DNA sequence: ACCTGAACACCGTTCAAGT
DNA sequence: ACCTGAACACCGTTCAAGT
């Protein structure tokens, strides 16, 4: 069953409030993570709390609307990178991009991990898109004999989300997520060991 | 500055309550993660909420007391494994053990990541112990020329916590943390790529 | 079709009164 | 030295009344 997704209203005042809430939400999630107080977001947007709930019935729909465009763009990016002549370089670049997007806000990657295999979830669609984009680049690298053939898109996704978690949760000056990605990609390569 | 740590009281009734709270907390954290309701824990332990706060002034001190023994035992395990003749095998085994302990409860690894570089935190001591244990096994594997000499104990710790997060946050049937560890260790090896 | 804010529920945390 | 539970604060969520 497909989850309810927030829709931008048709009426002018509704659309204005919808946009303001989304802008306030992005700022709040950015500053305080995905468990930012919804009342603060409503106040910053200049609307009553009921208005926020009217547009975004759950916290997850609000998070989803805040990141949808960014995450779905990764699919297009994968298609673009698939044209490169260096399949492992393309995969590596895409993984770095994806990790960055999955750690846009502190807490986001937890929702993504919970959404990947649960259709009834607002973020599920974006997860499927990412999965498909990664699977495409993975298959190309495997087809060229450069990445272990037994590596699955699920495992790639697990690697990406765990690196994104590391990025989200690193204290300043101790973010080793980029290095983690390099080590993982090295582990992906054919003949590694 | 060192953080306050919970201490087992001397008076018999206090000790009894302390133990009961800890037992109830382990069950609650196990079932519902580290953000389980403290009132539920107090009720399950048969004490008033103020009693819980008297022994464990913050949620983190309660979490710390729940996992201290398990985490600190990893140091002894590292020392034991250091005697093995296969340094990479020893490191691999220790990483698997450590990942398992860091994901004892859902939410634990977030506290661990925040505690590693913050002395004023109840779990800091256990993090330092783990860090030291891992550093020892890493140095041995590097000394034998089997692991990249530029890999640091901080990076190893980041790899372990991110794998633990993957383990904590995997839906049933989709836990790829063990594979992630294998891929990472392969990335650690000398001459990988 | 959309907005408002009071009302209720839930839970974290403190503290005065007790033994 | 330790226990109790009422009291307060904060925030999520709903809904009747409004435009």
Image: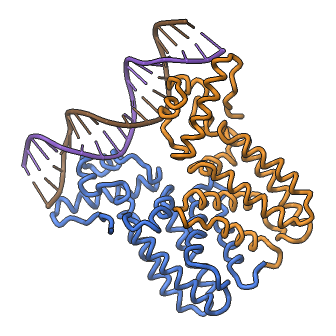
Chain colours: A blue, B orange, C brown, D purple
Q: Relative to A105, is A91 above or below?
A: below
Q: Relative to B25, is A147 above or below?
A: below
Q: Quadrant of the N terminus of chain A?
A: bottom left
Where residue B56 sits: x, y (%)?
A: 60, 29
Where residue C8 sits: x, y (%)?
A: 26, 34
> Which of the 4 image quadrants contains residue B140?
bottom right
> Which of the 4 image quadrants contains residue A18?
bottom left
Q: Quadrant of the C terminus of chain A?
A: bottom right
Residue at (64% x, 20% y) in the render:
B14
Where residue D2 sits: x, y (%)?
A: 61, 17
| Numbered-mark total | 0
Q: A137 left or right of A128?
A: right
> Which of the 4 image quadrants contains residue A2?
bottom left
Q: Relative to A106, is A153 above or below?
A: below
Residue at (61% x, 47% y) in the render:
B111
In this view, the residue in front, B8 or A24, is B8
Q: Relative to A164, is B30 above or below?
A: above
Where residue A96 sits: x, y (%)?
A: 58, 73
Residue at (69% x, 21% y) in the render:
B9
Q: B141 left or right of A133?
A: right
In this view, the residue in front, B134 or B47, is B47
Residue at (41% x, 68% y) in the render:
A124
């Amino acid at each position: 069953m497909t989850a309810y997704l927030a829709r931008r209203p048709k009426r002018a005042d509704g659309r204005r409030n919808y946009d303001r809430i989304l802008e306030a939400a992005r700022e709040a999630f950015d500053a305080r993570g995905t468990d930012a107080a919804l009342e603060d977001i409503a106040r910053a947007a200049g609307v009553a709390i009921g208005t926020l709930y009217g547009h975004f019935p759950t916290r997850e729909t609000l998070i989803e609307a805040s990141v949808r465009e960014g995450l779905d763009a990764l699919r297009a990016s994968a298609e673009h990178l698939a044209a490169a002549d260096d399949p492992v370089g393309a995969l590596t670049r895409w993984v770095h991009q994806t990790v960055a997007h999955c750690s846009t806000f502190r807490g986001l990657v937890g929702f993504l991990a919970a959404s990947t295999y649960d259709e009834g979830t607002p973020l599920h669609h974006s997860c499927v898109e990412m999965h498909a984009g990664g699977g495409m680049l993975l298959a190309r690298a495997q087809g060229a004999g450069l990445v272990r053939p037994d590596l699955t898109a699920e495992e790639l996704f697990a690697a990406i989300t765990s690196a994104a978690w590391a990025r989200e949760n690193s204290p300043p000056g101790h973010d080793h997520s980029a290095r983690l990605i390099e080590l993982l990609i090295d582990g992906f390569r054919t003949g590694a060991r």
